[in-house]
């Protein structure tokens, strides 16, 4: 699953990357870098408008339209792409409201026993990454409307499976039009897009547990750390070298020490 991500690229970069149509009176969409985006917070999504691609803010946590008691309903932050076209919670959105979600990278945790090691995962080239998303507008009996959304996931590729068995559905620019065209493309027409990316597309950087707290929202949560197990392995290797007996003069290679 994907439970945290970051969007630190500038809005101007996103306008260029996605060829966005921005209204002339749009002054509020100059967001600062966000390093620790969590469920229930607003996230940016992109869809096809009448004049071209447009952006909007939705609450991260999809709420199906048929929900009557939202306070008793668990927000859906992820949807399994393999079953999204059949599940009642996602099938309408999968058919009619497929979205693009711009991210700079996401966080994932690798469980080892009772401990979890967080990783900052981003494209190796450092560019923008696009996750396939779904959007649903929930309407209350009092006329209240809330735009909500979730991220799609797929099975992990071989390299990422060492960290987690699920991976966000990452879309390439060449697939944006096909994905967003819900008028002509049913879910079966985009099933081939919901596959794991190539093994060399992502890099996973171990970071500290600062990311675990939503209140920590600065760039420092992406600072690399040395994994304890790796440090221990290096220390053991050094110790083993110290204990190794010195070679005699008639060895194949003479020791200088």
Image (tube, helix red, strand yellow):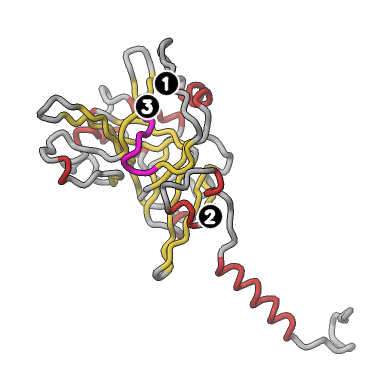
Q: In the current view of this chain or complex, which residue is farthest to the top? A: 24
Q: Earlier in the sequence, mark 1 or mark 3?
A: 1
Magenta-colored stretch includes residue 233: no
> Does dot 3 land on a helix, a strand or a loop?
strand
Q: Whole-Å distance between the Cαs marked 3 and 2?
A: 29 Å
**Labels 3 & 2 near each other (Cβ < 8 A):** no
**Where's residue 111, x and y in %?**
41, 64
Q: CA distance from mark 2 to mark 1?
A: 32 Å
Crowd tier of the residue under label 2, counting other residues whose Cα lies within 10 Å: few below 14, some 14–19, many 20 or above: many
First-in-chain label (3 vs 2): 3
Question: Viewed as shown, does residue 208 lie left or right of 141?
Answer: right
Disc sitting over residue 46 in the figure: 3
Residue shown at 27%/23% (left/top)?
184
**Label ID, residue 207:** 2
- Is 44 one of the magenta-colored residues? yes
Q: Is residue 85 left or right of residue 110?
A: left
Residue occupied by mark 1: 28
Q: Over which residues does the magenta segment extend?
A: 38-46
């Amino acid at each position: 699953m994907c439970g945290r991500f970051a969007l630190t690229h500038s809005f101007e970069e996103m306008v260029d990357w996605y060829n966005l149509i921005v209204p002339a009176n749009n002054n509020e969409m100059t967001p600062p870098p966000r390093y620790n985006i969590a469920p229930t917070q607003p996230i940016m999504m992109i869809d096809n408008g009448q004049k071209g691609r447009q952006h909007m803010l939705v609450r991260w946590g999809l709420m199906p339209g048929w929900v009557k008691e939202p306070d008793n309903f668990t927000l859906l932050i992820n949807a399994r792409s393999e079953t999204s076209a059949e599940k009642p919670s996602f099938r309408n959105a999968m058919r009619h409201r497929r979205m693009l979600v711009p991210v700079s990278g996401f966080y994932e945790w690798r469980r080892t026993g009772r401990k979890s090691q967080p990783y900052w995962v981003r494209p190796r080239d450092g560019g923008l990454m696009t996750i396939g998303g779904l959007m649903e507008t929930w309407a209350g009996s009092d006329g209240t409307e809330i735009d909500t959304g979730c991220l799609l996931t797929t099975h992990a590729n071989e390299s990422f499976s060492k960290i987690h068995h699920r991976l966000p559905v990452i879309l390439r620019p060449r697939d944006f039009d096909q994905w967003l065209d819900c008028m002509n493309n049913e879910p079966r027409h985009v099933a081939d897009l919901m596959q794991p990316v190539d093994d060399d597309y992502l890099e996973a950087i171990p970071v500290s547990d600062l990311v675990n707290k939503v209140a920590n929202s600065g760039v420092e949560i992406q600072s690399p750390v040395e994994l304890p197990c790796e440090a221990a392995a290096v220390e053991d290797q050094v110790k083993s070298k110290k204990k190794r007996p010195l070679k005699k003069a008639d060895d194949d290679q003479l020791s200088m020490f």
